[in-house]
Amino acid sequence: MKKYQLIEHTADIGLVAYGQDLAQAFGNAAQGLFSIITDLRKVKKIDSKTVEIREKSPEDLLFAWLNHLIFLFDAEQLLLKQCDVKELDAYHIKSICHGEKVDPSRHEIKLGVKAATYHMLKVDPENNRVQVIFDI
Amino acid sequence: MVGVSGMLEKVDDYRWRIPSSFKDGMRVPGLIYADENMLSHGLEEHALEQVANVAFLPGILKYSLAMPDIHWGYGFPIGGVAAFGMDNGVVSPGGVGFDINCGVRLLRTNLSEEEVRPKIEKLMDKIYYSVPSGVGSKGAVKLAKDEIDEVLAEGSLWAVKRGFGKHQDLQTTEEKGQIAGANPAKVSQTAKTRGTPEIGTLGSGNHFLEVAVVDEIREPEIAAVMGINMTGQVMLLIHCGSRGLGHQVATDYVKIMGEVMARNNINLPDRQLACAPLASQEAKDYLAAMRCAANYAWANRQCIMHWVRDSFCSVLGKCEEEAGLELVYDVSHNIAKVEEHVVDGRKQTVCVHRKGATRAFPPGHPDLPRQYSAIGQPILIPGDMGRVSYVLVGTELAMHETFGSTCHGAGRLQSRAAVKKHLRGQQVLYELQSRGITVRAGSISGLAEEASEAYKDVSEVVKVCHNSGISRIVARTRPIGVVKG
């Protein structure tokens, strides 16, 4: 089963992510996000980071969580190859993300991602599917 | 179903209206600046839809406006302009965008293409080496603890005090590079953490640094006031914004505005339009934080300009005075400003959102530097990487029609994925080099995404601004060297 699919947007890039359950779809969205930034095949799982967020709705949760991962890349140069979502309900997410710091000798940074936006943002628990547009 | 393009009403050759009957909930009509040619090539349905969506915002005045470089954004279209009354209107972080005060500055020189050409490779190397660029570029200026707050409060002035450039540069920067009302306490620690290591860096995406040559002067008298005297004269363009700091400020406040909307029962067709009444504390907080990000961006461009001047000095052996490296002007194209405008025959204070749009104030406007009072505000419109850029000036008509605004660039035509399907970075590099443009880029694959084919022709865009009267073309430049972030 496909984990995620990129959506073409004139100036930016979006993605739809799928999973066996919603937690997996969230995890796959994170992987999709980092696949926009770099070639994930070249990223090793050396560091891990626990990210836990509470919000008022599933959409806010996806928005805040992905933006926090973007912050981790920007502020700590972390490339995250895999995010395991351990706990997820409508208002809370706990995830453990694995990856490593950028090593310019091994990682080509293809694109910077400024933020996840609310534009066309969707969390679909019935079909275990999420959608988000990033500002590039 | 009839799409929004089927609903467009022709006003004249350069103006098209989306009637407010198009969607239930539009408070004003949409007004799009475009010509028949742009329409026949199809304006993006998504972008037009976004023009209509902006018209839903409470307190919007006159029109939801779109400049001819309009394209699909998130929330607001890129190329969107909207103004709101201070007492019943709103501010929307999505109407400014994530790259707060992304903008352009133009420098003039006394040098000619003949003098610079032989040393262009060396010059571009030096600039590329001096100005950190690319995704995650960092470390150009080391800030002391809490110094970030000074950057946010003082903008370009902070940079000048740190030795980057001179006081005179402030005179020819929009808002003198330090917009009033910035309050660093309203910027999150997360944003400051992102921004601290990135000050003085170009970033990535469509940001660039360009050594250009004047190739046409249409209005010699106006151009001369800006120090643009002859074709073949070497110029410099810097295009970048507020880096991670601005992105984080936008992210933080879009979320906060979502909560305000729920509280005030404001319903909008796109959550990225999230807004707060201008009178609310949240709106005041956002504006105070946005102004900090704007000041950061001006400080950023000021630092970068300083290293570019240094690079010229060391490579060409001609330093500032002799080389005449003066700042012509610096404009912002992603910002919300509190300005005075005449609406319904009455002078009012309004909040103008320019999202991918440039301020275009006319001659005599009190906010202009004295030397430009007679000619109007310089407007800097960069084209894409391989093509030309333009210098325009603001007009009285822009004040009447567009809240003193005009276009900001070429405007994207093709998605990144679409352009990469038929173009490789190497090809683009080769093509630019064969046209005499020296390129330095961190990511070769990124080059393809910013290729000319991905953009509208900037000449067509400025032609609509000129012919419609919302600005006036003064001069055109073409690139001879580019640093791509």
Image (cartoon, rainbow, N blue to C red):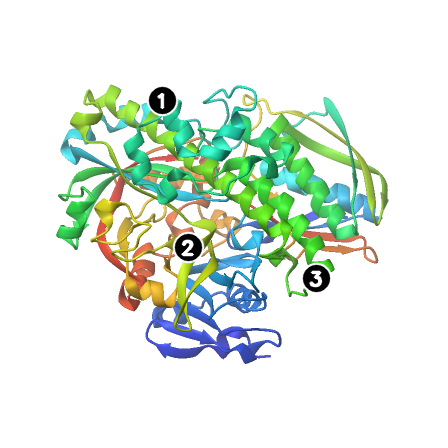
* Residue linked to disc 3: B264
Same subunit, labels 3 and 1: the answer reads: yes
Indicate which label's residue lies in the foreground, 3 or 2: 3
Kind of element beneath mark 1: loop
Indicate which label's residue lies in the foreground, 2 or 1: 1
Q: Where is residue B23? Give x, y as percent.
A: 59, 76
Tell me which amino acid carries mark 2.
Answer: Ala
The answer to which of B339 and B239 lies nearer the viewer is B339
Q: Earlier in the sequence, mark 2 or mark 1?
A: 1
Estimate how packed mark 2 is, as few (under 14), some (14 to 19) or many (20 or more) residues with alpha carbons within 10 Å: many
* Residue linked to disc 1: B163
Q: Which mark is residue B411?
A: none
**How far is the residue under mark 2 from the one under mark 1?**
31 Å
**Left or right for B22, reference B303:** right
Indicate which label's residue lies in the foreground, 3 or 1: 3
**Left or right for A81, reference B216:** right
Tell me which amino acid carries mark 3.
Answer: Asn
* Residue linked to disc 2: B357
Judge whether B485 appears above or below B340 on screen. above
Q: Where is residue B366? Give x, y as percent.
A: 31, 52
Residue A4: in sight, yes or no? yes
- Quadrant of the image occupied by residue B116: top left
- Quadrant of the image occupied by residue B327: top left
Judge whether B428 appears above or below B156 on screen. below
Circles 2, 1 touching at the beta carbon (< 8 Å): no
Kind of element beneath mark 2: loop
Q: Where is residue A51? Give x, y as percent.
A: 77, 33
**How far is the residue under mark 3 from the one under mark 1?**
47 Å
Tell me which amino acid carries mark 1.
Answer: Gly
